[in-house]
Image: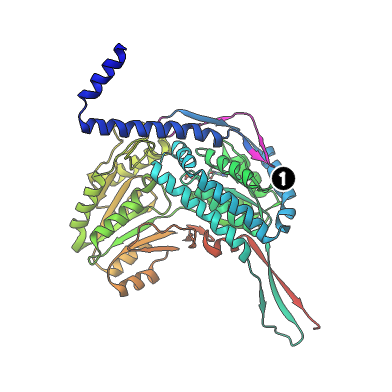
């Protein structure tokens, strides 16, 4: 009775504003509690091989914002990788022999299940990867897009009849799945990088063994759980978890039963995998590092350029291979652009991705923080100027301040390597020719961005930039309907669109003579 009175008195003392804030907080807490409960249904702590959940608890997967353990997953090795390949090989023929529309129907069910579980997948993603919940939800929707698209595309892997070179013959080209595929995926998009590889492979009739990144295996396992519910037959999609990727990676790239390796990650590791896969001449798909220029011309719409730069640079705390790594700004707009970008950066809220209003989560691990620090120290020593941020965030752990630096140049590490962190590194240029030269002076060629309102310049830049993806007046280009991929040391092949599925088929030419 007394407690009730005390509570009522407290309630009366609150102002309307306090009341609103408290209701908002309570709603958020109850949302988080509900989500926590839901996640348990998709939180798997075993690997998935041949339609069976398998393996003893091995290494811990941590919540990147708190450092708390979310789950322990099996630390598997070469033997389990071989078992997964055996399962995928056994499953290959029956899966490839299904009618395209039967494979499409299963993929479609998987797509719907992912969308039905989008909130809990997003929460799991935020916990194991660190990105804010709204970004995580965006990734789940984007990742599901590949499943839906490839469910359709499964039915459209058309062959050809080519006008014959002989009077009594027919030239026919048919398409066949390449066979067992091995996929090695990174931690920065733990949902989308799985679906972007697995679903074109499955649509084409291939089976697949996935080795997810050691920092983020839980989304891969959650996706496997939904694939199982959708009716993906056993052995068609396998997930092998491990802490140290070398042994499993070696098997996946050297076993002759694997006919294609698809990898997203660093150029350094991509080159190792490519060399390993050469022994058995596997098909290969590589999405490697970038060093994206973002060019802002004097005639740009400045607020659009700032929005584009923010999206490209600070999404996922700058940990994407298409993040703007060098921001090149024409002299006439330089000061205004830097001021506007810095004002926008100041609005960033750093914190745990599950907290309301947070726009930048933690970096993936301490090595990532140390790399950002090393790049900044090197740039400062060589004359760059820090305009905002520049150090670890007061929240500690792996949180880093959103940072703006100007005066970057060719001698600096952040010019030549991906910083992979929340650092907008800016320099000034004078002419179009100079911008093109600065942008192309890298062994990489994944994404480039241009901000201009001049139509002729738009086409000139699109032609002149040696990159696989060009965003004009856009900082976000990724979508399942367009081909994603790079040139030069940024990789081989494309993912997404009808081109993405074509990577997983072999052409067969049949000449029918004597007609
Ligand atoms: P990042 O530097 O972004 O972590 P990595 O290229 O190191 O990128 O990692 C991407 C993926 O490659 C992860 O799944 C990781 O486990 C895997 N990987 C790293 N080294 C090897 C290796 N030697 N063999 C096979 N896989 C590897």
At 48% across and 28% down in the image, what residue appears? 69
Residue 96 visible (yes or no): yes
Image coordinates of residue 105 in percent, x first then y, are 63, 55
At 48% across and 60% down in the image, what residue appears? 484
What residue does disc 1 label? Answer: 87
Image coordinates of residue 447 in percent, x first then y, are 41, 59
Q: Work out whether residue 136 or residue 294 is closer to the camera in this orientation and state it.
A: 136
Image coordinates of residue 199 in percent, x first then y, are 58, 54
Q: Is residue 19 above or below residue 371?
A: above
Which contiguous range is marked in magenta? 48-66
Image coordinates of residue 431 in percent, x first then y, are 25, 68
Find out whether residue 3 is within the magenta segment.
no
Quarter of the figure with the C terminus: bottom right
Q: Is residue 70 above or below residue 225?
A: above
Residue furthest front in the image: 1
Residue furthest top in the image: 2
Residue 151 shown left or right of residue 16 in the figure:
right
Find out whether residue 61 is within the magenta segment.
yes
Mark 1 lies on a secondary structure that is helix
Q: Work out whether residue 30 or residue 400 is closer to the camera in this orientation and state it.
A: 30
């Amino acid at each position: 009775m007394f407690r009730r009175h005390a509570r009522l008195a407290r309630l009366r003392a609150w102002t309307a504003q306090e009341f609103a804030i408290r209701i908002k907080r309570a709603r958020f807490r109850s949302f988080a509690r509900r989500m926590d409960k839901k996640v348990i249904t998709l939180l798997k702590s075993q690997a998935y091989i041949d339609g069976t959940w398998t393996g003893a608890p091995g290494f811990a997967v941590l919540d990147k914002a708190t450092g708390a353990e979310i789950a322990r997953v099996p630390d598997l090795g070469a033997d389990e990788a071989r078992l997964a390949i055996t399962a995928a090989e056994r499953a290959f023929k029956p899966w490839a022999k299904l009618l395209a529309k039967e494979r499409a129907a299963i993929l479609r069910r998987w797509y719907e299940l992912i969308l039905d579980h989008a909130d809990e997948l997003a929460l799991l993603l935020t916990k194991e990867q660190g990105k804010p919940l709204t970004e995580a939800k965006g990734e789940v929707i984007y990742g599901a897009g590949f499943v839906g698209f490839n469910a359709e595309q499964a039915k459209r892997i058309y062959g050809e009849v080519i006008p014959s070179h002989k009077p009594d013959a027919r030239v026919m080209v048919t398409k066949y799945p390449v066979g067992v595929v091995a996929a090695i995926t990174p931690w920065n998009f733990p949902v989308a990088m799985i679906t972007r590889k697995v679903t074109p492979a499955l649509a084409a009739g291939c089976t697949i063994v996935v080795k997810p990144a050691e920092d983020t295996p839980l989304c891969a396992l959650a996706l496997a759980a939904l694939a199982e519910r959708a009716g993906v037959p056993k052995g068609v999609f396998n997930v092998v978890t491990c802490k140290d990727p070398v042994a499993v990676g070696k098997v996946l790239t050297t076993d002759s039963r694997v006919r294609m390796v698809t990898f997203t990650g660093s150029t350094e590791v991509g080159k190792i995998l490519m060399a390993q896969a050469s022994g058995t001449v596997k098909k290969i798909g590589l999405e490697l590092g970038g060093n994206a220029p973002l060019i802002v011309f004097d005639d740009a719409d400045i607020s659009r350029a700032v929005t584009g730069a923010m999206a490209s640079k600070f999404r996922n705390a700058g940990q994407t291979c298409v993040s703007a790594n060098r921001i090149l700004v024409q002299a006439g707009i330089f000061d205004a652009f830097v001021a506007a970008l810095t004002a926008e950066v100041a609005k960033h809220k750093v914190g745990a991705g599950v907290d309301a209003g947070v726009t930048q989560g933690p970096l993936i691990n301490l090595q990532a923080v140390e790399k950002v620090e090393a790049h900044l120290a090197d740039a400062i020593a060589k004359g760059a100027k820090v305009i905002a941020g520049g150090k670890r965030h007061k929240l500690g752990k792996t949180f880093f301040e959103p940072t703006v630096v100007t005066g970057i140049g060719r001698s600096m590490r952040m010019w030549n390597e991906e910083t992979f962190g929340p650092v907008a590194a800016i320099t000034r240029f004078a002419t179009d020719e100079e911008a093109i030269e600065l942008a192309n002076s890298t062994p990489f060629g994944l994404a480039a961005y241009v901000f201009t309102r001049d139509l002729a310049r738009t086409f000139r830049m699109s032609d002149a930039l040696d990159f696989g993806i060009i965003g004009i007046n856009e900082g976000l280009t990724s979508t399942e309907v367009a081909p994603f991929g790079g040139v030069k040391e940024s990789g081989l092949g494309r993912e997404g669109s009808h081109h993405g599925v074509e990577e997983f088929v072999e052409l067969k030419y049949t000449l029918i003579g004597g007609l």
